[in-house]
Image: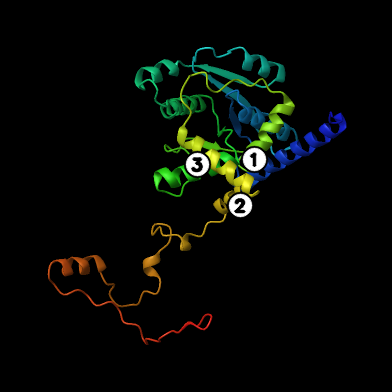
């Protein structure tokens, strides 16, 4: 049975309204776009960057501040890349755009052994080229199409394989301090973006033209999160909410919270590392501070003490 067109239209309007609200909220929460900004939207030809550009163009018409948008695509000379798709689309849309032609594909292929993932080197080269373009053209903000699911996946990638609690920030300053990168889709679910892109019928360009093997670690994390979401709906939202509700005092990083100062007296601090060395060396260790009163505790549960 076909779905009435009025229902489809209503559902799309609700979806568009939700995405616009989430993007607008992210921009406001993190101060992503300011009056007079020149925003470079990095357009790859995938669903995320198309949606980002589309939503930002809509917001630009009703935003309380004036800002420019310029779409930029990097043609990396991958075999089979449909080089006319984006210029045709952007011209019809009436958006200022630039196509940067740089053969990073040959560089990557000459450096990375066959069968190995090329995504890491490719992304570093791409980032350098885009940063240089931004500096040469007065770009004040660089907008990327990463969404909520990307941020959560990156959290677990770093947790499982990097040993650190780190995700993708919605807004960051480049290492050299010259560029501000923003991710306006940070509050948007990938499933909503995929639905929006299908409804808008964007001319999607495949992301596997380079022939590189997909990042298997990220693929495994994505599958894990999808399994969790099926079993426990809303879990991804909960994890993302945790990224916005961090309590450094309940983690264990002494560079984020001064644990050593908790309850510290005015007397000299005990050097426990030196004490341990003294024990190994046969010396006398420092005595730990004694409690004022030792009170025995008894716990009673089900008649067992």
**Depth order, front residue of 274/95:** 274
Q: Which circle marks residue 189 in the picture?
A: 1
Who's the residue at 49% across and 18% down the image? 76
For the N terminus, which image quadrant? top right
**Residue 262 in sight:** yes
Who comes first in sequence, dot 1 or dot 3? 3
View extreme (front): residue: 303
Residue 295: which disc? none
Q: CA distance from mark 3 to mark 2?
A: 15 Å
**SS for tag 3?**
helix
Q: Is residue 27 left or right of residue 222?
A: right
Look at mark 2 in the image and give the residue it sits on.
Answer: 238
Q: Nearer the viewer, residue 167 or 231?
A: 231
Residue 46 placed where, x, y %? Answer: 60, 26
Is 39 displayed left or right of 4 in the figure? Answer: left
> Which sits earlier in the primary sequence, circle 3 or circle 2?
3
Question: Is 111 rendered above or below residue 288?
Answer: above
At 71% across and 32% down in the image, what residue appears? 196
Residue 171 appearing in the image: no
In this picture the colour scheme is rainbow
Query: Which is nearer the N-term, disc 1 or disc 2?
Result: 1
């Amino acid at each position: 049975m076909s779905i009435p067109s009025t229902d489809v239209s209503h559902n799309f309007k609700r979806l568009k309204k939700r995405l616009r609200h989430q993007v607008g909220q992210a921009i406001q929460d993190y101060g992503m776009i300011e009056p007079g900004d020149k925003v470079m939207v990095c357009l790859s030809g995938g669903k995320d960057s198309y949606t980002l550009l589309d939503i930002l163009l809509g917001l630009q018409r009703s935003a309380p501040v004036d800002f420019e948008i310029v779409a930029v695509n990097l043609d990396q000379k991958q075999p089979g890349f449909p080089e006319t798709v984006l210029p045709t689309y952007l011209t019809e849309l009436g958006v200022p755009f630039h196509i940067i032609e740089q053969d990073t594909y040959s560089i990557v292929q000459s450096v990375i052994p066959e069968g190995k993932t090329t995504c890491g080197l490719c992304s570093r080269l791409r980032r350098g080229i885009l940063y240089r373009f931004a500096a040469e053209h007065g770009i004040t903000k660089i907008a990327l199409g990463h969404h909520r699911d990307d941020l959560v996946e990156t959290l677990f990638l770093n947790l499982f394989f990097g040993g650190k609690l780190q995700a993708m920030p919605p807004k960051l300053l480049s290492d050299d301090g010259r560029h501000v990168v923003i991710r306006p889709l940070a509050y948007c679910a990938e499933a909503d973006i995929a639905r929006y892109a299908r409804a808008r019928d964007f001319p999607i360009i495949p992301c596997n033209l380079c022939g590189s093997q997909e990042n298997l670690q990220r693929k495994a994390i994505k599958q894990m999160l999808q399994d969790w979401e099926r079993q426990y709906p809303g879990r991804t939202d909960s994890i993302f909410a945790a990224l916005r509700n961090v309590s450094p005092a309940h983690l264990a990083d002494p560079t984020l919270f001064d644990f050593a100062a908790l309850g510290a007296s005015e007397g000299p601090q005990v050097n426990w590392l030196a004490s341990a060395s003294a024990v190994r060396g046969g010396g006398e260790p420092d005595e730990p501070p004694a409690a004022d009163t030792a009170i025995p505790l008894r716990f009673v549960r089900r008649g067992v003490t």
